[in-house]
Amino acid sequence: MSSLELQAGQLAIIIDDIGYNLDAGRRAADLSGDYTLAVLPFTPHGRELAERAYRRGKEIMLHAPMSNEQHLPLGKGGLESGMSRETFLQVLERNLADIPHVRGVNNHTGSQLTQEEEPMRWLMAELKQRGLYFVDSRTTAKTRAQAMAEAAGLPNRKRDVFLDDRPEPAHVASQLELAMATARRQGSAVAIGHPYPSTLAALEKIAPLLEKYAITLVKASLLMPSSRPSVNAGQCLAPPLSLWAETPPLHDPFSLPPALKWLE
């Protein structure tokens, strides 16, 4: 047995942006292994997919939409810069109530809001009171979210690797190996992906890679609390609309202005 095989680590893989595309969400929920699904609030299939994933042994997070520097609209459930504390906590409470079986929270976009200490302080205090954890998706290198979680004594973690900031299969495969190597080197790591066909295809064939790197796939809650250096920064932008909606949702939070049509 090689020295590589003698080493071991734990890897939590969070799949973000669950709730709009029913087929992709079902495919994510049905993955074999201890995955964590982060579900957007007030989406057409969010509750159904959270229930399905929970029944199949997955861990559920709230994927909380937060203000971003790209000015992408957030829709219902968005935590916005400039909100009063009362309004902020009311929106957060409704978001948490909308998704069943929530164990933790991570940010959807949030490159603006996570830089702001006061709303992050409100967030972490509320999550601590509810016995939840927080994962900082690190959509900006300037984030203060994890620092505020640490100050509140809240179990927390930050994203180490984005699997599919570029969804090409070769890039996803490379990032998945990076996540494995990071988990082995650090002892544990958190990777974030999305329900892209390329990502789901890679995760459906992950078993040989886990064996090669001697990695155990675990739910995100099993890595709390911890504080590890991030491997790569990046932006967790809204996935293209073509990924999500089989039928147009009643309220589409990501209707893009012409200047941003390249995201589709």
Image: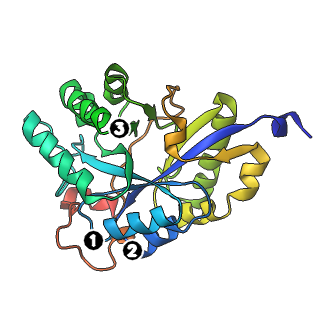
In the foreground, 155 or 161:
155
Vertical position of residue 151 compared to residue 119: above or below: above
SS of the residue under disc 3? loop
Front-most of 22 and 133?
Answer: 133
Q: Is residue 16 left or right of residue 202?
A: left
Residue at the (37%, 22%) spot, across then down: 150
Point out which mark residue 44 bears. Answer: 1
Q: Regarding mark 1 in the picture, which secondary structure is present there?
A: loop
Visible residue check, residue 20 = no
Reading the image, the residue beneath label 2 is: 22
Q: How is the image coloured?
A: rainbow
Q: Callout 1: few (<14), some (14-19), or many (20+) C-alpha neighbours within 10 Å?
A: many
Asked if the residue at tag 1 contacts the one at tag 2, i.e. Cβ–Cβ closer than 8 Å, the answer is: yes
Q: Quick one: quadrant of the N terminus?
A: top right
Q: Earlier in the sequence, mark 2 or mark 1?
A: 2
Picture quadrant of residue 248: bottom left
Spatial CA distance of label 2 from label 1 is 8 Å
- In the drawing, does residue 213 fall left or right of residue 28? right
Q: Earlier in the sequence, mark 1 or mark 3?
A: 1
Tell me the mark number nearer the camera, choosing from 3 and 2. Answer: 3
Q: Position of residue 96 (x, y in %)?
A: 26, 51
